[in-house]
Image (cartoon, rainbow, N blue to C red):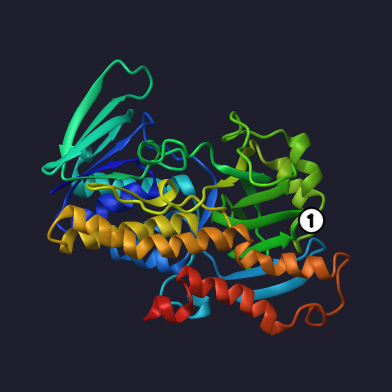
Amino acid sequence: MTVLIAGGGIGGLTLALMLKRRGVRAIVFEQAAEIRELGVGINILPHAVKELAALGLAPALDAVGIRTRELAYLNRLGQNVWAEKRGTDAGFAFPQFSIHRGRLQKAIHEAVVKELGPESVRTGLKLAGFVQGEGGVTAHFVDARYGLTSQTVRGEALVGADGIHSVVRKAFYPRQGRPSWQGAVLYRGCCEWPKFLTGASMYICGGMGAKLSLYPIAPGAKEATRLTNWAIVAKVADGEITPPPADSWSRTARMDDVVPYARRFTAPGVDVEALVRATPTAWEYPMCDRDPLPRWSFGRVTLMGDAAHPMYPVGSNGAAQAILDARCLADALQSAEHPMRALYEYEQERLPKTAEIVRLNRKGGPERVIDEVEKLAPAGFEHVERVLSHAEREGIVKGYARKAGFALNQVNK
């Protein structure tokens, strides 16, 4: 069996590696000219690290990332709303990694090339269309830059792992329009900075108006420093869910736009404004998602990752869910008698779970704990317990973990 994978991101590459381990041939097609270290920091939670460790990737992640030890939710004044241990410090059998997205992608890509061979990842090719029949699916790829050359490839299944602007998804949902946007912009950057707390700690600060995420993603050039990632979410427009501006994807941010938001936050041990100002380049993204779909699989073609369930980047769950998709789909393709049956079983397992996470993330995910405290005590508090009880705060944070599949008993079982 040959599986064609449109998209060479974290999900698509992980799927290729998992299929190889199950005796299924995979070919990845990526429209970028090369797999490069793009992006900034992300978190990979223990339930996803468990899957990557099974592929032998744990040493590579340790070499380029940080094992996150603790997380603190703070209000904008720096007062502690909720704190907890993370990863192995919290008793998980697997760590949580804070890591540069590009370095994670590179580690998986190198493993794919090593195990599947260099021809298994074909870059500079964009999916132009596909046709399927009882015997298989034929996909047509064109040169992503000039469109002057093309490749036509046949396989038993096609997987759209081509992101929020998925060509595969659009083929089945041509009237879906642009992604949904509620007026929030995500500013992101990273730079070398003195470590704070344990040097493997994470802050999420603020509330409904604006939020700051702050965490190290790699060792620094000196023992006292870390490559430190920051992300600020700010509401810049009001209204219902509307399409984002057409030209607003992954563009360089103006520091004059970012610094006023940075001044809002107090994070113990970190000069947030100075950190933002010291960042060589910051990026701006509309904080978007799409409504959950009624189905992903159509015959021999299916969706995964952001192509299937793009979600707001809260709860550290986007890349993790793509990795879980890959595991489920690889297992189904190995065990099912027919590829169409495999894609159906995969959809039945993963679609309801990810649809629930999309809806939870729209409401703030675990970060809703600081939203609720800000509603009740916008000017701060003397005792958080008098604002929102421990049980209520725990219900928000731990309840999300259970529904997203990374509670302690779920990972360690």
- Residue at 19%, 28% in the rendered image: 152
Using the image as rendered, state which of residue 208 and residue 136 is in the foreground.
136
Secondary structure state at the residue bearing disc 1: loop
Percent coordinates x, y for residue 342 in the rendering = 22, 58
Q: Quadrant of the C terminus?
A: bottom left
Using the image as rendered, state which of residue 275 and residue 291 is in the foreground.
291
The number of callouts visible is 1
Q: Classify 10 Å Cα crowding around label 1: few (below 14), some (14-19), many (20 and above).
A: many
Using the image as rendered, state which of residue 55 and residue 307 is in the foreground.
307
Percent coordinates x, y for residue 254 in the rendering = 71, 33
Q: Amino acid at mark 1?
A: Phe
Percent coordinates x, y for residue 157 in the rendering = 21, 46
Q: Mark 1 highlights which residue?
A: 265
Is 145 on the left-hand or right-hand side of 310? left
- Residue at 37%, 57% in the rendered image: 323
Is 220 on the left-hand or right-hand side of 118? right
The answer to whether residue 220 is above or below residue 27 is: below
Taking the image as drawn, is residue 58 in sight? no
Percent coordinates x, y for residue 184 in the rendering = 68, 46
Q: Identify the image quadrant of residue 359.
A: bottom right
Taking the image as drawn, is residue 257 in sight? yes
- Residue at 87%, 77% in the rendered image: 382
The answer to whether residue 243 is above or below residue 18 is: above
